[in-house]
Amino acid sequence: MSQNLEKFPEHSWRSTLHEVIFEADTFAGRAFDIVLILCIMASVLTVMLDSVTSIRAQWGDELLMAEWLFTILFTIEYVLRIISVRAPLRYVFSFFGVVDVLAILPTYISVIVPGSQYLLVVRVLRVLRIFRVLKLGTYIHEARLLRVALRKSSRKITVFLFVVSILVIILGSLMYMIEGEASGFVSIPEGVYWAIVTLTTVGYGDLSPVTPLGKAVASLVMICGYGIIAVPTGLVTVELSRVTAGRISTQACQNCGGEGHDADAVHCKYCGAKL
């Protein structure tokens, strides 16, 4: 670890590059984030417009040029991010590192896929470029807070979903017994499907009880649905308030690119390097 730290003096050009690209507490860092957010939004808009046949027929060449311009810009950005961290592999295999690759790779792959019979495959690859919208998450401080809150509440939400899964199986089986095939509940899986749709208050209406007992059970399920929807929201809200109260720094680790550190953190909680 100490050897890696020696490679990056505190005032080296890589240290400055890291501060501009990964952090948002300086003028240069904020300007970089704003420009990059605008580029991401413009590139996503380009992909969306390219999917409209009439627009593609009239502006196809211009959209293709814009797409390559964005791809080159994001490629340069990706390379600079790798250069500016002490542990490049940590960043490459991180969530946003993978997203960065997904944002640029399809355009390059579409060039090396030959033959008109592969045009459909190329179209699918081009749609993958919509992953660029996920890059926005790295430039929104509130998104970092939300990510930390979701991670802290993930176990509670998992247990909650497990309980809900058991509940819909029981309700689906019960409605299968009450209504039967005459009402469209031809199997327990059909009953479970109805229970999920009803409990989440979606209510497609393709399956509905017709017996008085079935309607009574359905009414209880609908009422419970409102309470069940509020549970995961409450769990995340509690953790979000705790995270917000604890204050999260905008500083990113110069070694691995990790974010979401406490405001008074001295070392990275992912790799242990000094912040």
Image: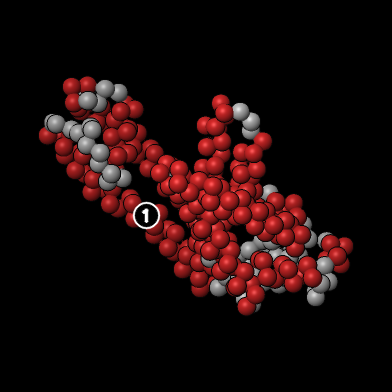
Q: Quadrant of the C terminus?
A: bottom right
**Residue 148 in view in this figure:** no
- In which image quadrant can residue 183 be found? top left
* Residue in view at x 18 percent, y 22 percent: 182
Residue 77: horizontal and vertical position, in percent? 67, 59
Question: Is label 1 in a helix, a strand or a loop?
Answer: helix
Please tell me whether residue 230 is drawn above or below residue 212 in the rendered image.
below
The residue beneath circle 1 is: 231
Going by the image, does 162 lie left or right of 16? left
Q: In this rendered view, identify the residue nearer to me: 105 or 49.
A: 49
Report the residue at 61% width, 54% height from top: 69
Mark yes or no: residue 128 visible.
Answer: yes
Image quarter of the N terminus: bottom right
Could you tell me the amino acid type at mark 1? Val
Point out residue 185 in the picture as x, y percentages from the top left corner.
24, 26
Q: Residue furthest front?
A: 58
